[in-house]
Image (spheres, rainbow, N blue to C red):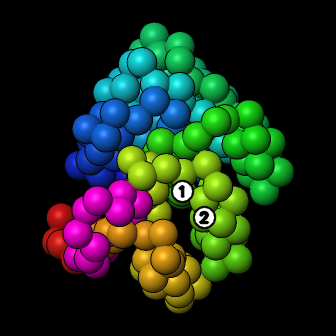
Amino acid sequence: KSLSAPKYCGLYANLAYQLGAKTLFELGTCLGVNTCYLASKNPEAQIVTFEGHVPYIKIAQKGADTLGLTHINFVEGNIDTTFEEQLAKQAQLDFLFIDANHTYEATMRYFKTALPKIHDQSCMVFDDIYWSKEMTRAWTEIKQHARVIISIDLYRCGIILFNPKNQSGHYKFRF
């Protein structure tokens, strides 16, 4: 139940590819399915994925090794600390996929922590935006943030873009 459908995995990977993302962070590796999609489609990118549950990260690493995906950095531990530590090592963040700790507080913290590293071409994807009232509240606030130019609501996930050269808008699509 916690895995993304293939069409979403493909969407995330293609989105990162089309945007030319070179630094991709994924909060919530789980079994590594999205991680492998992101890495397969973006072989020149640096993929950093975070997971707090040790058995999951071992499965994800095995899957990536089987596929020969060597440009993934698996970060084990509490995302509340490891995310900030790894983010501090980056000049910028091109793509952020958030599928971890589905609370309002955590989602907002991840968003705000990443903001100083985003740029006009950056993209953030929030999974499970209607999973709970807290996630919906976070999504509603995030898409209204002053730096967000475009938000795309696909019900399962929300995508935000930051390029001020684009016409601003908030869109909903059935996907």
Residue at disc 1, secondary structure: strand
Q: Find out whether the residues at labels 2 and 1 contact each other: C-beta distance under 8 Å.
A: yes
Residue that sits furthest to the front in the current view: 165
Residue under the image location 48 percent in, 69 percent down: 147
Residue under the image location 55 percent in, 43 percent down: 93
Residues shaded magenta: 154-171
CA neighbours of label 2 inside 10 A, class few (<14), some (14 to 19), many (20+): some
Question: Is 161 above or below relative to 54?
Answer: below
Three-letter amino acid code at the position of disc 1? Ile
- Identify the image quadrant of the C terminus: bottom left
Residue 163 shows which numbered tag?
none
Provide residue 145's location: percent of width, then percent of height: 50, 78
Residue at disc 2, secondary structure: helix
Observer able to see residue 167? yes
Question: Is 171 above or below relative to 47?
Answer: below
Residue 98 shows which numbered tag?
1
Q: Quadrant of residue 16?
A: top left
Question: Is 37 above or below relative to 140?
Answer: above
- Residue tagged 2: 111
State which tag comes first along the sequence, 2 or 1. 1
Three-letter amino acid code at the position of disc 2? Phe
Badge nearest the viewer, 2 or 1: 2
> In the depicted view, which residue is nearer to us: 115 or 53?
115
Cα separation between marks 2 and 1: 9 Å
Q: Quadrant of residue 164?
A: bottom left
